[in-house]
Image: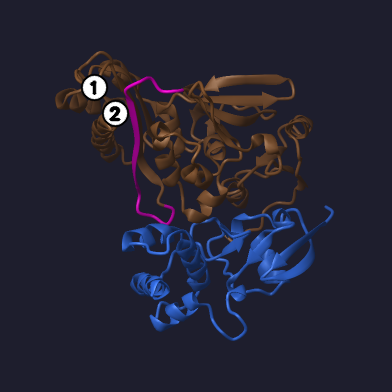
Chain colours: A blue, B brown
Amino acid sequence: MRKIPIKFTINGQQKEALVQSNELLINLLRDELYLTGTKYGCGIGECGACTVFVDDELVLACLTLAVTVDGKEITTIEGLAKGKELHPMQVSFLKNAAVQCGFCTPGMIMTAISLMKENPDPSEEEIREYMRGNICRCTGYTQIIKAIKEYAHNMKA
Amino acid sequence: MLKRINKFEYFAPSTLAEAISLLAEYKGKAKLYAGGTDVLVQMKQRKITPEYIIDIKNVPELNGITYSPEGELRIGALVTHRQFAISKNVPEKFTMLKEASLAVGSVQTRNRGTIVGNICTSSPAADTPPALLALDAGLKLVSSTGERTVKICDFFTGPFKNILKDTEILTEILIPDLPENSGGIYLWHSKITEEDETLVGVGVVVSVDNLQNKVCKQARIGLGSVAPAPMRAVKTEDFLKGKILDEDTIGQAAEIAANESLPRSRAEYRKEMVKVQTKRALSQALKRIEG
């Protein structure tokens, strides 16, 4: 089957690629662009480890065909820091020890940033509801929620 | 679950006519693709292995939520759960469908998954069908040889099965206006698993003669996850018609609903929960009429 040419922006950089029809965004990111921050967890949309932004919309890279990002703008965890300066949400996760093995962390941070855009001052219940699609097997979520709360608090100040 | 999906030829038509003719051409070997949140999972699980994928995301006719002066709500096939949940074009009387949309998956899947896709997958545990059953939604099915509109209560035929032909596209959902003094709600609770699949979902619309006497003019109840396919609780609806909706009647109705539900696994618990949720849903729908 012929490969399909696509053009897209990834973390602010324009790129072109030739993809198979059945290639998933997660494969494009990890295997071809070597952006391995986005994790391949369950592969069926249950764990949220592959969460990225496509045109500012929070989506799962494991359930997105690569050909469908033609003309779109993708942001992954690698695109958050400005040079050596981490995104404040990353800082808050580090400060609150919201990371253990780290596998779920990129997805958690993307979802947390999306939450803050939609609802800058969420209650704990709203945080838990919004983060429902991101699963963590180590932290028990307490530190993650703390990190998000602290970020929201700092942004208000 | 790290399986790759099978190879296929990819089409992205830009008109409905083109999409329909592709479907007719590759009859039975093609799969329509919008959000991908169900289709790609089924492909990974090798439940389906389509040779052609027809991505309808670029078909403008399938977009949009419109509310007509006659009171009918039209939802295009590309409307995602998220778009619907935040839409300002949806009058308050249809809030229950927003509640059902918000019960689906996670933020990430709601951003991509569509209401029409939720119907087409026809999972017995889907959240929007019980609400749409209660709202008596119509579904417009279009193929190269014509179109037909069916009521959603005639659409599902079994677990993951429906009457949609392999040449047809479900292009839009048509929700008729509600009579005066109507209230609706969708209640659900889920299994505690990674995907939080709905264990029991109840959609209810009740209409009363007037707010003083609370005589039930009409009731429609949709049940999810308690039968091989989403179902209407017809016996319960018949029982309620013409009765005064007091606590006693609502309690009896909830019993009837539990009895007519057909759960297979965890049947006893599910039936009990149909009773609990139907009772709650009827009382809360009634409160919503009062405003």
Q: Which residue is mark 1?
A: B211
The disc placed on residue B289 is 2
Q: Residue furthest right?
A: A2
Q: Nearer the viewer, residue B153 or B72?
A: B72
Q: Residues within 10 Å of mark 1 (few under 14, many from 20)?
A: few
Q: Secondary structure at mark 2?
A: helix
Chain label for disc 2? B
Q: Position of residue B254 (x, y in %)?
A: 24, 28
Q: Which residues are magenta?
A: B177-195
Side of B146 where A153 appears, left or right: left
Above or below: residue A49 compared with residue B89: below
Q: Dots 1 and 2: beta carbons under 8 Å?
A: yes
Q: Residues within 10 Å of mark 2 (few under 14, many from 20)?
A: some
Label 1 to label 2, Cα distance in Å?
8 Å
Residue at 19% from the left image edge and 28% from the top image edge: B251
Q: In the rendered image, is residue B229 in sight?
A: no
Q: Is residue A14 magenta?
A: no
Q: Position of residue A113 (x, y in %)?
A: 49, 67
Q: Is residue B189 magenta?
A: yes
Residue at 41% from the left image edge and 74% from the top image edge: A151
- Point out the tag, 1 or 2, that comes first from the N-terminus: 1
Side of B214 where B168 appears, left or right: right
Q: Classify the position of the C terminus of chain B by image quarter.
A: top left
